[in-house]
Amino acid sequence: MGTALAGLAGASVGVPAMADPDALLDAEEQAWVARHPVVLFAPERDFPPFSFVDSQGQHRGLSADVLELVQQHTGLKFQPVAAADRSSNIDRLKRREVDLLTSLRPTAEREQFIAFTSAYVSSPAVVLRRRNDHRSGDLAKMGGQRVAVDRNSAAEDFVHGTYPDVITAEVDAAAQGLRDVITGDVDACAVNLATASFIIERDRLGGLHVAGETGYFSTLTLGYRKDWPMLGRVLEKGLAQINDAERAAMIARWIPLSDIAWWQRPEVQRVLGAAAIGTGLLMGGLLLWNRALRRAVAQRTDALQKELAERQRLETRLRTLAEHDPLTGLMNRAALTEALRRSLALAARQKWSVAVVFVDLDKFKAVNDSMGHAAGDELLRQIASRLQGCLRESDLLGRLGGDEFIVVAEALHDGPRNAIELTDKLLMQMKRPFLIGDQSLAMGFSAGIALFPGDGDTPEALIANADAAMYQAKEQGRFRAALFKGSTLPAVEDPT
């Protein structure tokens, strides 16, 4: 069993000098890239090691490094939107809210509305059981057993379709499926081998072993808009530039090689075997006592692991509820205020500027009144996603409530100019219609800008002053922005 990579690398593992896109792309492809300076992509939130969001909120994994290399080779500029689960990301691509998905396996259903590149990685799906569970790992012999599978994955479809007698237990993430095996909530977990290896190493999970192979391989590609065939041509050329040395580097970087426990490795077994011959009589008297002790420890460990897993689930859920807006997943007012407070402290030390941009939607109540609150909620989610797609990874985005959003841009070296450029970019993206159901909505937006230092020294003062500037802009018409200590800026031009 192993993971085959068809094209993987990243700047952090030794990338060669940047290629010349003009030498790689033909004139038609170069013109297309020039007309599409930014390609929005949706990272998958929890699909390690291929795509995940780390503790700093950064998109990481094989797919992140693949995009970095393709970007260098082709001149494409990839810009992430807020990470989500696979099903939500596919819906975003259907609605053309994003242009690219990073870690998809082609299926007949998906190919109806998504185009796919060549595969950049292939890894087998395996069956994992508890180490002391010696039953077969052959899915054909596991009828009536509960097997955890990742919800909305191609592997789930494979198990359902090929082994209908297996009882599938859907989980939101592979890590949960592995923990459910450890705690005995399920009999086994069918999971990508690379994913399982990464999670076991990262989370220090013990007590698992590979019981068998499923016969299914996760062959992952980049999925892109079907109405953009030229994007596919450019992506294919970028993937083809990734060389064997870079692929090998990616295996070492992302696929842990510790899938065999240290005491199971042949060289260790030989040493232990030789030692046992010399000390067998001495150890014999201790074995019975030691076996009973191990059994008691194992039982207690299982109970503690189950309790710890449940506590972690509850703590994560409570932390999420306390810090995030449940509708959009963005930071709420309290969390954003504290994050802004930290940004201001850092800015004071580093002598750089911070911009607070207050973005407000015009006539949102009319949408709720005419189309219903479900449509209004969907509009807010799409706004959040589109705003996120305009930001740098270091920028912050939160929802204050209703139709009010706050953007915090830090590390600005030319505060007013940088803030105006960012706000123009935000408003220009908001001018594109939103697709709610089968209805296209063109909404109006206004923005106000407050800067540190100068417009306030606390989060509360900066947010209030950005709010005041926003109302100044709103008085001048739609798609206007204003500086707190300055004039209203011209309306942004229609995007071409």
Image (cartoon, rainbow, N blue to C red):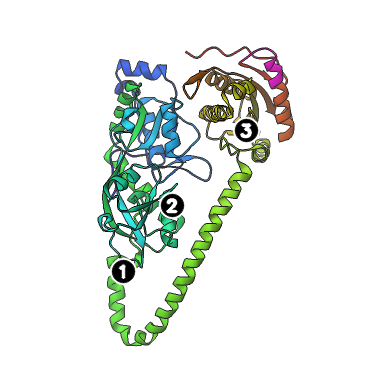
The magenta stretch spans which residues? 470-478
Q: Is residue 453 above or below residue 331?
A: above
Q: Amino acid at mark 1?
A: Val
Q: Quadrant of residue 276?
A: bottom left
Q: Which residue is mark 2?
A: 175
1 vs 2, front mark: 2
Q: Quadrant of residue 134?
A: bottom left
Characterize the local packing of mark 2: few (<14), some (14-19) or many (20 or more) Cα atoms within 10 angstroms. many
Mark count: 3
The answer to which of 471 and 39 lies nearer the viewer is: 471
Q: Is residue 372 above or below residue 106?
A: above
1 vs 3, front mark: 3
Q: Which residue is mark 3?
A: 399
Q: Amino acid at mark 3?
A: Arg
As measured in the structure, the alpha-carbon distance from the residue carrying label 2 to the one carrying label 3 is: 29 Å
Q: Position of residue 44 (x, y in %)?
A: 43, 39
Q: Is residue 474 magenta?
A: yes
Task: Answer with left or right where residue 34 lies relative to residue 324.
Answer: left
Characterize the local packing of mark 1: few (<14), some (14-19) or many (20 or more) Cα atoms within 10 angstroms. few
Residue 268: assigned label: 1
Mark 1 or 3, nearer chain start? 1
Task: Answer with left or right where residue 14 lies relative to residue 433.
Answer: left
Mark 2 or 3, nearer chain start? 2
Task: Answer with left or right where residue 482 lies relative to residue 255.
Answer: right
Q: Amino acid at mark 2?
A: Ala
